[in-house]
Image: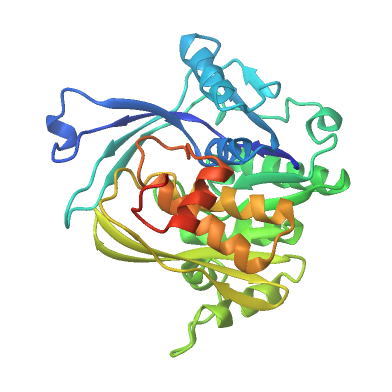
Amino acid sequence: MGKVLTLGEIMLRFSTNQGIRLAQSDTMAVHYGGGEANVAISLANYGHDVSFASKVPNNSLGEAVKKHLARYHVATESLLFGGDRLGTYYLESGIGQRAASVVYDRAHSSFAEMTSIEWAKEDLFDGVDIFHVSGITPALSPTWQTLTLDLMKSAKEHGCKVSFDINYRGKLWSQKEAGEVLKTLLPYVDYCSAGYMDAVHLLGIAPQEGEELPYYYKKMQALYPNIQVFYSTKRQVTSASDNHLTGTLWMDETYFESTTQAICPIVDRVGGGDAFSGGLLHGLLKKVSPQEIIEFATAASALKHTVHGDCNQFSEEEVNGFLAAGSGKIIR
């Protein structure tokens, strides 16, 4: 198994019950989550040696973050304590034709307010096979744009593969700003989660009528030949509770597509993309075939949609059991 480091902000999430508007809710479910932490948990579930680097306040909320990660066997030696607050966000759960919506309250969090790299890079990247970060981190501040680039360069200097999920969030920064920052980051990336929308709206690739996803993967790789693997999902949305998910992978200059997974009803969509990334990185670390990689990653994402909270809660054996048995069948 591999050694992985993920780095980013972890937040406290408050979620309404289905059918209740945020403004009318008097009770909420509470979970901890964040893209990079969710990927860390997935990979730890699959047996990898995983550490999560972040910064949380030195209070009971920060301690709860540490316990949350430890519960899933994610190492927390690189979890720093300090600063004033833990970022939060509020999720109004979608149902039927009404989509879910998010309200962020993450400004001035302990992680977002960091102004320098507070870890010793030699310790942070020692023996690490993959360093994973997402586009949410540089979206937090101009300082984090610089720090993310510095960390990527350091990871490469220490022999790590760099995994990057573009994970664009329009509530955090504009497409123009994101596109400019991506130009500085992507030359240091080996594995990248990016799809059609990223190619057109962030990377400046002109849309071509009639062209499918392989065309855009080729174009992105032409821009950044250092990136060995591109991946993303295609999601057919019937309603907030009924989706069809297909995984796609560009590897060895070849396009691969998974079996489509029907997900109905969806219990919780948040973290589905992180579960997909975690499943894909797992396959890369195990060095299985590209088709096996994309089938596993898509199945892992489909399973995540069936549980509450941000993080994937399934083991490698359970994901493989789901693939073998087929959707909805009893595993005996």
Residue 168 visible to the viewer = no
Name which quarter of the figure residue 158 lies in: top right
So how many labels did they put on this image? 0
Furthest residue in direction front, as rendered: 332
Q: Is residue 91 left or right of residue 95?
A: right
Q: In this image, 123 relative to 263: left or right?
A: right
Which residue is more in the foreground, 50 or 131?
50
* Above/below status of 233 relative to 169: below
Location of the N terminus by quadrant is top right
* Residue extending farthest bottom: 210
| Residue 279 drawn at (x, y percent) | 58, 51
- In-image side of 28 versus 130 (left or right): left
What residue do we see at 62% from left, 35% from top? 44
Asked if 2 appears above or below 73 in the picture, the reply is below
Structure colour scheme? rainbow
Front residue (pair 149, 71): 71
Residue 43 visible, this angle: yes
- x, y percent for residue 283: 66, 55
Q: Against 78, is 247 above or below?
A: below
Q: Residue at x 47, y 19 (%)?
A: 85
Residue 224 image offset from top left, x and y in percent: 71, 69
Q: Quadrant of the C terminus?
A: top left
Image location of residue 317, percent across then percent down: 56, 44
Residue at 76% x, 56% y is: 188
Quadrant in the picture for residue 14: top left
